[in-house]
Amino acid sequence: MTDEKPTIAEGAEYVVFFEGGPSDGRTDTRVSTDGSYDDEITDYVLIEGTETGIVYKATRAHMMGEQLQVHYSLDSSDSDPVPDPEDRNDEVN
């Protein structure tokens, strides 16, 4: 990302786009607490009944009209480990 971060009013909403991992394609709305956006988001999801923290890092941000849109990509190295589906010993009927 560039050093130039778009800014918005403190308390304004911005739209989050998740890319990769279990939240891929999902969007969310967050509120700016300081006129900027989060550089990193930990999204908690249930995987096999266990709450798992999946880390996403901001990769690009831009203004679309008056709305800030921020894209976040999966950072698997900082996320909780998730077992590979082939290693889960799922039973097949």
Image (cartoon, helix red, strand yellow):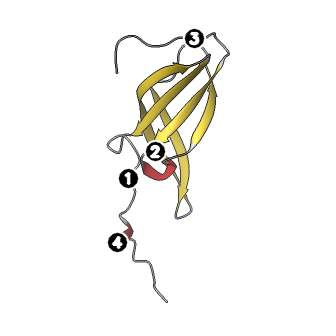
**Few, some or many C-alpha atoms within 10 Å of disc 4 (few <14, some 14-19, many ≥20)?**
few
> Does the residue at mark 1 contact the one at mark 4 (Cβ under 8 Å)?
no
Residue at coordinates 39% horizontally, 77% vertically from top-left?
Answer: 89
Outermost residue toward the left in this view: 77
Q: Which residue is mark 4?
A: 86
Disc 4 or 2, which lies upstream in sequence? 2
Check disc 1 and give the amino acid type: Pro
Disc 1 or 3, which lies upstream in sequence? 3
Name the residue nearer the viewer: 66 or 23: 66
Note whether 80 is above or below 82 in the view shown.
Answer: above
Q: Which residue is mark 1?
A: 81
Residue 44: quadrant of the picture: top right
The Cα atoms of the two marked residues, 1 and 3, are separated by 33 Å
Check disc 2 and give the amino acid type: Ile
Front label number (2 vs 3): 3
Outermost residue toward the front in this view: 65
The Cα atoms of the two marked residues, 4 and 3, are separated by 44 Å
Q: Which residue is mark 3?
A: 35
Disc 1 or 4, which lies upstream in sequence? 1
Residue 21 horizontal/vertical position (percent) = 43, 50
Residue 50 horizontal/vertical position (percent) = 53, 58
Check disc 4 and give the amino acid type: Glu
Disc 2 or 3, which lies upstream in sequence? 3
**Few, some or many C-alpha atoms within 10 Å of disc 3 (few <14, some 14-19, many ≥20)?**
some
Front label number (1 vs 3): 3
Question: Tag 4, which secondary structure?
Answer: helix
Name the residue nearer the viewer: 74 or 42: 74
> Does the residue at mark 4 contact the one at mark 2 (Cβ under 8 Å)?
no
Mark identifier at residue 54? 2
Residue at coordinates 49% horizontally, 90% vertically from top-left?
Answer: 93
The Cα atoms of the two marked residues, 4 and 2, are separated by 20 Å
